Amino acid sequence: MNIIVCIKQVPDTTQVKIDPVTNTLIRDGVESIVNPFDAYAVEEAVRLKERYGGKVLALTMGPPQAEAVLREAIGLGCDEGILVSDRAFAGSDTLATGYTLAAAIRKIKIFDIILCGKQASDGDTAQVGPGIATQLDIPQITYVKKIEKIEDNKLIAHRMIEEGFEMIETSLPCLLTVVKEINEPRLPSLKGKMKAKKIEIPAWKAIDLDIDEVQLGLTGSPTWVSKIFTPPPRPKGEIFEGAAEESVNKLVEVLKDRLK
Amino acid sequence: MDYLLTEEQMMLRDLCREVAEEKIMPVAAEYDEKEEFPWEIVKTLAQSDLCGVYIPEEYGGMGGGILELCILVEELSRGCAGIALSVAGTALGTDPILLYGNEDQKKKYLPDIASGKKLAAYAITEPAAGSDVSSMQTTATKDGDYYVLNGTKHFITNGGDAETYTVIAMTDKKKGSRGASAFIVEKGTPGFTFGKKEHKLGIRASSTRELIFEDCRISKENLLGKEGQGFMIAMKTFDMSRPGIGAQALGIAQGAFDAALKYSNEREQFGKPISSFQGIQFMLADMATQIEAARALIYATARQIDAGAKEISKESSMAKMFASDVAMSVTVDAIQIFGGYGYIKEYPVEKYMRDAKITQIYEGTNQIQRSIIALNLIKELKKK
């Protein structure tokens, strides 16, 4: 089984600064880590390899230093890594990122499953995974909390929803985004770390991919960020105690009051 | 201090530190309280390739030596010395196989130990044979292609939880210490059962149990080395393993010191952090210096053994004795720096002190270590 796991390097804090001009994240000077949700995707990919055999390739798009997350993934059991990095990709929104990663995956060619974290901890959009699947025109299951089985080119997964889960069957190849309930990521292994230290990681540029340059980076990103702010915390709920009828009346009064 | 470790050794140290900080420290107090064997942690260690760091690559290990084992034990012991003992006690049980096992024995036993699938243990101590090893009563009587074991071993680390046991027994009582032999005994062999489990002051996450042999028949293929070599195998094993005990003590001391230093900077009295008082500063300075001296001695000894030195008893005993004495004094001082809080179980330092005490006792009391050192000094003098 050939598995691709898409990971992203993110700043190791929720208190990041925003560039006032472009309204994008300022990454300089902030320690970088593997997006926490992607760590579950890496673990699941390695577990699938242990269960069904095959190999795991870690893929990331980002600046040259994003290579560090690929080495970390290899330390955790991935077999190889590919970095997609070019100035032309700078400022990509989720559409352009999905487009670029899909182009890289087309170049990799051989794969059965693509795993992604449900979202990145910096942008929180949860759009890149589905974007890649759409670009590649393959089925996708988002918010996966369990992979039940893979058999006869079919995969059955549990997709988490607010109350319970859906059981979904899909053909392969497919893309899954995973939630943190799916597993508990392991620590790296000594052999993995040694391999990660030595391995050569290819860096693909825009010219290495079969892509339309207009769809890359800032020019290929229709998303326009008008303002970034911390939403006010949800106010505390109110509990009306007493008999049902009395409480309901009270609630109706309060609601009427609010609507005024 | 920079010990000029190789890139691999630093990688090993960093990984062990990560395991200690993320997986061991958060649960150390709980395992200590419950006296439970840390199988979950053993699983983590196995997954991270840390069970076989000192085993040659051809048998599935990482091919490291005593220095690598010391780095592993030191870092894990910073988290919990009892939990670290699951691997350190296994190394002690594995050393005789590494030293004297034949190719078949190595192929049969080492890969499962290296992968962490099985733990090992070393059984020499008996109720009436502690420091005086030669007074052991357990016998191994030859019967055709078999040896029949009878007797009781006690205080055996990993007892009951390990699968592979190296056992020293008398094959010829008349010959005294030259009549002892070493055997590999597997858990589940008929006639081999486990007795009393000890409740201890410290290293409570480690199991310490009695091994009982009643007409336990084992194949002659399980004999390590030759008949009559048991005592020598035991002593050579200790020469190799004592730096590891030193490393365990060192890890305990470092863990206690780290906690004390941090606390002394946070705790305020008379309007200032207590680390600003000279009385505390002198303690911290002494503790740190002692720890560094112990580390230098242990690493130097380990490197000497790894380089193939033959005469290592003296240095090996020095490393164990010095580091364990340091661990005891540093942990006592760590409690002193914590004051009343140090005496309370909610804070980590009282456990470090309880764990430290055993390192002055097992694998030869520090009095025995001093005897070994002195006897070697006299021997060296006579050679001149």
Image: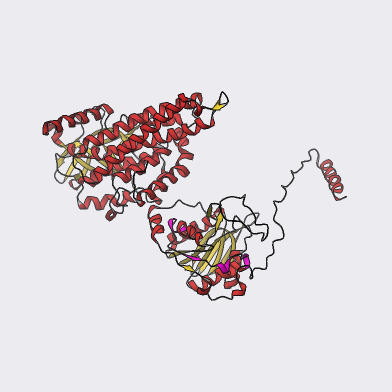
- Can residue B185 be seen here? The reply is no
Residue A93 is a magenta residue: yes
- Between B23 and B153, which is closer to the camera in this rendering? B23
* Quarter the C terminus of chain B occupies: top left
- Between A122 and B82, which is closer to the camera in this rendering? A122
x and y percentages locating residue B288 in the rendered image? 40, 33
**In the rendered image, which quarter is residue A22 located in?**
bottom right
- Between A171 and B13, which is closer to the camera in this rendering? B13
Count numbered badges in the picture: 0
* Quarter the N terminus of chain B occupies: top left
Above or below, B83 against B338 in this view is: below
Q: For the view shown, which residue lies furthest in the right direction?
A: A260
Extent of the magenta region: A73-95
> Is B166 situated left or right of A151 in this image?
left
**In the rendered image, which quarter is residue B363 located in?**
top left
Above or below, A110 against A124 in this view is: below
The color scheme shown is secondary structure
x and y percentages locating residue B354 in the rendered image? 40, 29
Residue drawn at x 24%, y 51% as measured from the top left: B106
x and y percentages locating residue B54 in the rendered image? 30, 47
Residue B379 is a magenta residue: no
x and y percentages locating residue A235 in the rendered image? 74, 45
Above or below, B118 against B204 in this view is: below
- Can residue B97 be seen here? The reply is yes
